[in-house]
Amino acid sequence: MDSKGFFGQWGGRYIPEVLYQTFQELQDEYKKARQDPSFWQEYEELMQTYSCRPTPLTYAGNLSEHFGGARIYIKREDLNHTGAHKANNVMGQGLLVKRMGKKRVIAETGAGQHGMATATMAAKFGFDCTVYMGEVDVKRQRPNVFWMEKMGATVVPVQDGSRTLKDAINEAFRDWVTNIDSTHYVFGTACGPAPFPEMVSWFQSIISKEAIEQIQKMHGKLPARIYACVGGGSNAMGAFTHFLDTDTELIGVEAGGLGLDTGKHASRLCGTDASPGVAQGYKTMFLQDDDGQMLETHSVSAGLDYVGVSPILSDLWEKKRVRFEAATDKEVMEALDLTMRLEGIIPALESAHAFVQAFKEAPDLKKDDAIIINMSGRGDKDIFTIAHAFDDPSWKEFIIKRAEEYKS
Ligand SMILES: *Cc1c(COP(=O)(O)O)cnc(C)c1O
């Protein structure tokens, strides 16, 4: 990152003047933390005792044998507290908030996973917590809203625009502008104005810091390739960071939805539907129309359904250091099915995108090559979508029965 927050031509900090001082303060605190080894030590201790770190690297022997090519390893971010890599980011920011002496946190959330993680962190640290969530998502993600409220957070349904994630982000910024002194905005992914992209990536880099040691111990050399799904880009940056200076090939997998040629997807760096733009405080490749209005995205996984992408990934894409691919909804279900049956592991719908691409390429790699799939989260949260997609009649019956019980 340069002094103005750019990675090549991407990123920056496009914010209203009232937020300048707050961002400066955040940037200073973040820089201080980075230069202070005791901060990272405190962070690692917290993650070890609260979030099961280091997460295992699992050798997927049955999948490897099934494809007959590279040895497949899975980095198990699903075993974090709250079930995904998001804990890495929110707990790190929580420690920074403590240092800044603030007592209130706000967050945006789409599927509700980041809201859940933030509500959890706020409960642990004793912060007030408000989560902004599009009204459409509030309705779709009832279980997460329930738990956030039970942990003491206030969930505010946002009525603007398409009433989804991007509208929740805008509303969270509005809150921040009016409550600057008391409040920190816990941004959920490696996007937004500087220093968020770099700071979030730094916390997430704990993934590759562990993985690079684990793979050398288990496999004796570096992996040929690493696969990670890309929503905003935080789990991908986490999985890639410590491998950037190696020969390992890095592959980001975006949501192909119903197919790249249907317009119903969320692929920004793969395909041709995105273009450079400035929105939500930063410059990146956005899915937008000619007037800069954001397009509707589609994906079976709520967590990959975002119009922008990390400016750091836009830079790595432009430099051709990271290759981008897309997985369709249908391919995702097939990969999920296979992984459950052969390994007893249930990836989140988001994570399953990375599995799709790894499965396509594994057969063509050498038997003494290793590949790592970053499994960003667990699929338990997706039971409604997955059961629906597999068209399971007994599940349908269960849901209808439950509904009837509630009515009586
Ligand atoms: C939120 C989420 C993602 C997408 O976010 P990134 O910032 O791209 O990592 C991916 N997987 C899971 C399980 C998530 O919860």
Image (cartoon, rainbow, N blue to C red):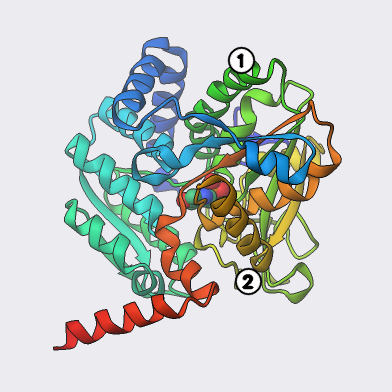
Q: Which mark is residue 295?
A: 2
Q: Secondary structure at mark 1?
A: helix
* Position of residue 360 measured from the top left corner of the image (x, y, whole percent): 78, 50
Quadrant of the frame with the N terminus: top right
Identify the disc placed on residue 217.
1
Q: Is residue 212 above or below residue 197?
A: above
- Give, as a three-letter code, the residue at label 2: Leu
Q: Which mark is residue 131?
A: none
Q: Around disc 2, counting alpha carbons within 10 Å, would you say few (fewer than 14), some (14 to 19), or many (20 or more)?
A: some
State which quadrant residue 164 falls in. Answer: bottom left
* Image quarter in which the C terminus is found: bottom left
Residue found 50% across the figure and 47% down from its top: 345
Q: Is residue 96 above or below residue 19?
A: above
At x 62%, y 49%, the residue is 230
Residue sitting at 75 percent across and 48 percent down? 324
User: Visible in this render: residue 374?
Assistant: yes
